[in-house]
Image: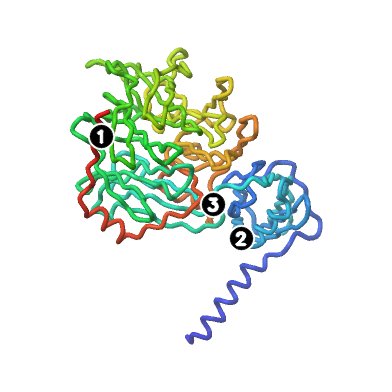
């Protein structure tokens, strides 16, 4: 056959797939809600979010969608298979025209020559923009393999995605624990474990490799949090153990044998102990700075004995005042007594506005991503009132972070299948109330049904991290700069 014949056939197929008829004639009304995946019904979305592509789960011969703006504008799409991929240009125009208003979705399905119209559902378009980038670590959801790990950047305003660092670029070394300061890519770091191990800092656009572990430290620096000034990074120094179980729904537990808090002074290249536990009676982990940098929050549990039951490890939330000029800390104070209600705290995260702290609450331990019962809770830092967030599900919620304007919260949730974590985004109002979350939109509406990797540590960012594989390999090949232990 000629190339011309193939081209004509291809054009014919594309024409037929695009020319799905609109509803006409007698249209039946169905009072039942239409079933779509992902569930984007009745959610609050930012005006700069990528199109919420989805597919209809009910059978039909043809599908028709009309999205109508409360203020003005509409967007109509036909489909033969129930999948709706929306034009980015038309979607952006529709959202711009309906800021702080609603857009309503009307779906009709043709079945056996008859059109059926389903009840509308809507989204509220917030004029509060979300940060333009989201960073996360992609890996397989089990503990069996770490040979494919990557830190990925995704545009939230489109479907563009790029890998910032992948471990096969650096000889299968494990890359983990990336962190930004105030969602700013100019203060960005990540850890690498293995023969090229170290902590990598972005400095003036280049990568600097540092060995933070000194001879005075029993354990290496793990979970990082930047001080708002950009001058310090607080870490926990943890000795971690994995425990494997034969129970169907509880195959692994990750816990600390001991842990403490340390502070890295970037300009002086010095490590120092955060002196909150001079008698080593406690395990302190997951540091978090207040928005003004005057307090360091952390999770604290009693130091375990040689023979212990991991289910008895309960972490409370503490804080300690900090003087950044003198590098001095005050005595710790209890903020939330989780052990008193038989629970445990992990991952405290404070809004950039400084008024709300969100943490994960679960039955025991501090590695909440393996806990089905893990939920998000918030603390009003003005009156220290605690409440359960409204965006939880029956499955794991954890690894949450804030947008720069404190209006959006992203977190990893396993609500889809109980195994793989996906990034969900909630609007947070002035009273700290979280809206129904929506999953990160994808160009392919069936993406999450087929993608087997899990999304960990989603972090908003306002700027692009631009690192090439060559730059990463060059930095990894250098000898690490050795941090020094502070003498005062």
Query: Upstream in the sequence, badge 1 or badge 3?
Result: 3
User: Residue 305 vs residue 43: left or right?
Assistant: left
Kindly identify the residue that appears in the image at 48 percent across and 19 percent down.
335
> Which residue is identified by label 1?
220
Q: Would you call the spot at circle 2 few (<14 residues within 10 Å), some (14-19), or many (20 or more)?
A: some
Q: Nearer the viewer, residue 451 or 325?
A: 325
Which quadrant holds residue 310? top left
Question: In x, y percent, where is residue 117?
Answer: 74, 50
Q: CA distance from mark 3 to mark 2?
A: 15 Å
Mark 2 residue element: helix
> Which residue is identified by label 3?
132
Tell which residue pokes out farthest to the top in this image: 340
Mark 3 residue element: loop
User: Residue 164 vs residue 125: left or right?
Assistant: left
Q: In which quadrant of the rendered image does the C terminus lie? A: top left
Which quadrant holds residue 241? top left
Kindly identify the residue that appears in the image at 24 percent across and 42 percent down.
211
């Amino acid at each position: 056959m000629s190339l011309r014949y193939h081209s004509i056939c291809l054009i014919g197929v594309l024409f037929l797939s695009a020319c799905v008829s609109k509803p006409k004639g007698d249209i039946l009304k169905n009072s039942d809600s239409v079933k779509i995946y992902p569930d984007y019904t009745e959610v609050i979305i930012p005006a700069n979010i990528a199109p919420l592509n989805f597919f209809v789960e009910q059978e039909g011969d043809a599908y028709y969608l009309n999205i109508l703006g409360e203020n003005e504008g509409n967007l109509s799409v036909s489909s033969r298979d129930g999948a709706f991929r929306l034009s980015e240009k038309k979607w952006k125009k529709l959202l711009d025209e309906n800021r702080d208003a609603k857009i309503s979705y009307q779906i009709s399905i043709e079945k056996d020559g008859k059109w059926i119209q389903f009840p509308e559902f809507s989204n509220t378009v917030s004029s509060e923009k979300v940060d333009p980038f989201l960073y996360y670590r992609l890996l397989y959801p089990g503990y069996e393999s770490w040979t494919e790990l990557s830190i990925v950047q995704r545009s939230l305003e489109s479907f563009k995605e790029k890998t910032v660092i992948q471990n096969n670029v650096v000889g299968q070394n494990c890359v983990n624990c990336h962190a930004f300061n105030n969602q700013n890519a100019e203060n960005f770091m990540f850890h690498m474990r293995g023969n090229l191990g170290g902590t990598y800092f972005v400095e003036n656009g280049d990568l600097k490799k540092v060995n933070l572990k000194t001879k005075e430290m029993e354990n290496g620096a793990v979970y990082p949090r930047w001080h708002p000034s950009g001058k310090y990074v607080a870490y926990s120094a943890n000795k971690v153990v994995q425990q494997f179980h034969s129970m169907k729904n509880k195959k692994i537990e990750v816990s600390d044998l001991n842990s403490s808090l340390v502070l890295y002074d970037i300009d002086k290249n010095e490590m120092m102990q955060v002196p909150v536990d001079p008698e080593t009676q406690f395990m302190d982990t997951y540091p978090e700075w207040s928005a003004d940098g005057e307090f360091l929050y952390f999770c604290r549990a009693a130091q375990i004995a040689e023979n212990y039951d991991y289910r008895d490890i309960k972490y409370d939330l503490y804080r300690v005042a900090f003087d950044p000029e003198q590098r001095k800390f005050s005595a710790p104070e209890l903020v939330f007594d989780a052990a008193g209600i038989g629970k445990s705290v992990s991952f405290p995260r404070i809004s950039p506005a400084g008024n709300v702290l969100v943490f994960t609450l679960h039955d025991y331990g501090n590695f909440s991503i393996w806990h089905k019962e893990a939920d998000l809770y918030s603390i009003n830092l003005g009156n220290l009132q605690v409440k359960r967030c409204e965006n939880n599900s029956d499955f794991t919620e954890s690894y949450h972070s804030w947008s720069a304007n404190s209006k959006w919260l992203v977190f990893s949730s396993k609500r889809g299948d109980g195994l793989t974590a996906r990034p969900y985004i909630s609007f947070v109002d002035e009273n700290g109330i979280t809206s129904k979350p929506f999953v990160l939109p994808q160009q392919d509406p069936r993406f999450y049904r087929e993608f087997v990797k899990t999304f960990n540590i989603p972090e908003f960012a306002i700027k692009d991290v631009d690192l090439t594989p060559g730059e990463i390999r060059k930095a990894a090949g250098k000898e690490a700069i050795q941090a020094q232990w502070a003498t005062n």
